[in-house]
């Protein structure tokens, strides 16, 4: 069975996927931790995050183990994965690795009381996160709260400077790895041309005019297409969105890395919303169309509304004679329709 971590023979635990996914619990992780007899445990991380409670349980288990915990962020430690990283006595990051912290979020459906209760729970979880990050970094809790509010991305050097890491290592060379045959024909051609172009680049004059090179292929910001494609693959894979790497690599609107990261993060949230709303089939279509997050939410709610519209929630007819006009039953579909009309008119 696929798991989001593995216990290697050299007393190294690797977290290379969503935390808490595929039915593997924090308990399984901690059981394997207990099986390690060595006084030091290595934890390697390359994860976009996952279940915050699983992340907290793993953090607490590592801290309570009595062992020296050596953490190494191999690519990205985002969201709940950054919590796991905070358990390290030593936290190493190659200079091209990244860390991301943000407030907890969820998807809730219910009446006003239920939604308020969910918000209260999120606030309490957020307080727990602030405490954990502040204890590790020594920063003021208000500063940590501000970083969570704005979803802060940290380079390795920034993580070191702010206390989220203890050492920056030389960069691990990034290499793309994917099956070219799975890409559309035009993507395969573009990639092949870019590879040929890369062979012709003079390492001592990498910025030479493209007319001096045969078969040059570059994007609008002057980055070789192969390099940009590699970056897109790396970013999308880190967030579990590798299925869309080829499309994003060819999208002229995503010519810089920041735009690619924003699209990938938004796509991941759209996918999560569709899963939670039991509309998994909608995710791929919305993501491939590049649907903005706000529009995707509206589309998901509309689909839920359409389903509600087929459910008769009106009261059963009474055998007694009507004593005048009776109020009509309020339908959930009416509420969604009114809300959507209000949003469209805003």
Image: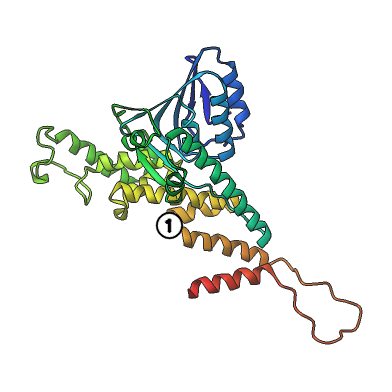
Residue 49, position in %: x, y? 49, 39
* In-image side of 309 versus 295 (left or right): right
User: Is 231 in front, or is 196?
Assistant: 231
Tell me: 286 left or right of 122.
left
Residue furthest to the right in view is 320
Tag 1 secondary structure: loop
230 relative to 32, above or below: below
Q: How is the image coloured?
A: rainbow
| Residue located at (11% from left, 41% from top) | 213
Question: Which of 255/344 is in front?
Answer: 344
Residue depicted at x 45% and y 53%: 287
Q: Quadrant of the N terminus?
A: top right
Q: Is residue 136 visible?
A: yes
Name the quadrant containing residue 238. top left
Residue 2 visible to an observer of this rendering: no
> Residue most toward the left?
212
Indicate left or right for 53 with 9 as reference.
right
Which quadrant would residue 52 be assigned to in this image? top right
* In the image, farthest residue toward the bottom: 324
What count of labels does the image hold?
1
Give x and y (percent) for residue 117.
65, 54
The residue indicated by pointer 1 is 289
Q: Relative to the observer, which residue lies in front, 75 or 181?
A: 75
Q: How many other residues sit within 10 Å of disc 1, few (<14), some (14-19) or many (≥20)? A: few
Where is residue 304? Give x, y as percent: 62, 61
Q: Is residue 273 left or right of residue 239?
A: right
**Residue 184 locus on image (x, y percent):** 36, 46
Q: Is residue 317 above or below residue 189?
A: below
Q: Residue at x 50, y 32 (%)?
A: 84
């Amino acid at each position: 069975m696929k798991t989001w971590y593995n216990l290697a023979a050299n007393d190294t635990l690797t977290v290379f996927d969503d935390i808490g996914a595929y039915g593997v619990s924090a308990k399984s992780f901690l059981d394997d931790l207990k099986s390690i007899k060595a006084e030091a445990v290595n934890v390697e991380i390359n994860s976009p995050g996952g279940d915050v409670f699983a992340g907290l349980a793993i953090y607490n288990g590592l801290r309570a183990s009595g062992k020296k915990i050596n953490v190494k962020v191999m690519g990205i430690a985002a969201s709940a994965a950054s919590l796991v990283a905070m358990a390290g006595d030593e936290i190493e990051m190659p200079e091209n690795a990244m860390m991301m912290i943000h407030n907890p979020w969820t998807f809730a459906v219910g009446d006003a009381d239920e939604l308020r209760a969910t918000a209260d729970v999120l606030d309490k979880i957020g307080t727990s996160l602030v405490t954990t990050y502040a204890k590790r970094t020594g920063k003021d809790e208000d500063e940590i709260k501000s970083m969570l509010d704005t979803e802060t991305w940290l380079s390795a050097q920034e993580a070191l400077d702010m206390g989220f890491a203890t050492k920056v290592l030389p960069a691990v060379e990034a290499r793309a790895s994917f099956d070219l045959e799975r890409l559309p024909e035009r993507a395969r051609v573009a990639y092949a041309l870019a590879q040929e172009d890369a062979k012709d680049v003079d390492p001592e004059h990498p910025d030479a005019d493209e007319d001096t090179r045969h078969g040059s292929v570059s994007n609008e910001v002057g980055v070789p297409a192969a390099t940009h494609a590699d970056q897109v693959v790396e970013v999308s894979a880190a967030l579990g969105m590798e299925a869309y790497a080829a499309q994003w690599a060819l999208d002229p609107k995503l010519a810089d890395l920041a735009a690619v990261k924003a699209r990938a993060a938004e796509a991941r949230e759209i996918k999560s919303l569709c899963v939670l709303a039991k509309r998994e089939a909608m995710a791929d279509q919305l993501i491939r169309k590049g649907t903005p997050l706000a529009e995707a939410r509206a589309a998901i709610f509309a689909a839920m509304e359409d389903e509600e519209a087929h459910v008769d929630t009106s009261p059963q007819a009474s055998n007694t004679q009507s004593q005048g006009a009776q109020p009509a039953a309020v339908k959930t579909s009416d509420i969604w329709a009114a809300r959507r009309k209000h949003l469209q008119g805003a």
